[in-house]
Amino acid sequence: MSYDCIVVGGGPAGLSGALMLGRCRRSVLVFDVGKPRNAAAAGLHNYLTRDGINPGEFIRLAQEEVRRYPTVEFRRTQVVAVERTRSGFTVVGADGSRHDSRKLLLATGVVDELPEIEGLQELYGTSVHHCPYCDGWEWRDQPLAVYGRGEEGPALALALTVWSPDLVLCTAGLTIFRMKR
């Protein structure tokens, strides 16, 4: 079967695209591995009517809404290759499946590569966070530590002053900037 569109990524963006396409009676196949970036977080924020919802519950509800449209299908596997064809695209899944579509929507999101710091992985999503807009409110007016190298560290520390004036910047011993007299 050839689809009107294959969506790679079943997070908020991919599911929004699939919802719109399903409502337009387009045949859609959504590929997703089921490992969202925010899985470790206690709550998803900045979505009207869903602020603070558990990320897994959000995805469950979104999939439930999208599944109401019979032209949308889901496949729980990773996409390992995409080929451009004369009529669109061929998408290859890790399970060996091949699927054709006229259009391709890439909604793969972001993968966080955490620095190798002992204990960081265990705290990720509870007291270590990657997004101040997602988690800054919950930590407002508390002492915060920022880890960053290069220009990103100071920039993030300055951005976090919206939530707390008590900040320390950790650079793993690297000098980020130097003041000259």
Image (cartoon, grey):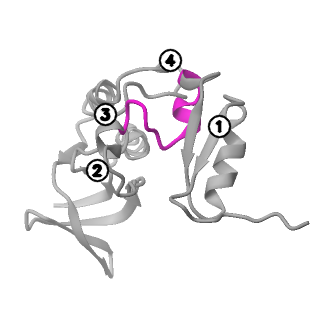
Task: Judge whether 140 appears above or below 119 on screen.
Answer: above
Indicate left or right for 32 with 102 as reference.
left
178 w.r.t. 115: above or below: below
**Distance of label 2 from label 4 (alpha carbons):** 26 Å
Q: Amino acid at mark 4?
A: Thr
Residue 10, by quadrant, is: top left
Q: Residues within 10 Å of mark 1 (few under 14, many from 20)?
A: some
Query: Which residue does the image show at 64% across and 48% down from the upper left?
Result: 156
Q: Nearer the viewer, mark 2 or mark 4?
A: 4
Please, what is the dominant secondary structure of the magenta stretch? loop
Residue at x-position 57% and y-position 65%: 174
Q: State the extent of the magenta-drawn residues as a range.
A: 124-138
Residue 125: image quadrant is: top left
Name of the residue lying farthest toward the front: 181
State the residue in front, 19 or 31: 31
Q: Which residue is mark 2?
A: 28
Residue 25: image location, x then y, percent: 34, 43
Lower position in the chain sequence, tag 2 or tag 3: 2
Q: Do the numbered discs 2 and 3 sit on residues whose CB atoms are within 8 Å?
A: no
Tag on residue 49? 4
Name the amino acid type tagged 3.
Val
Mark 1 or mark 2, earlier in chain: 2
Q: What is the crowding at mark 4: few (fewer than 14 residues within 10 Å), some, or many (at least 20)?
A: few
The earlier-in-sequence mark between 2 and 4 is: 2
Magenta span contains residue 131? yes
- Of the 4 image quadrants, the one containing the C terminus is bottom right
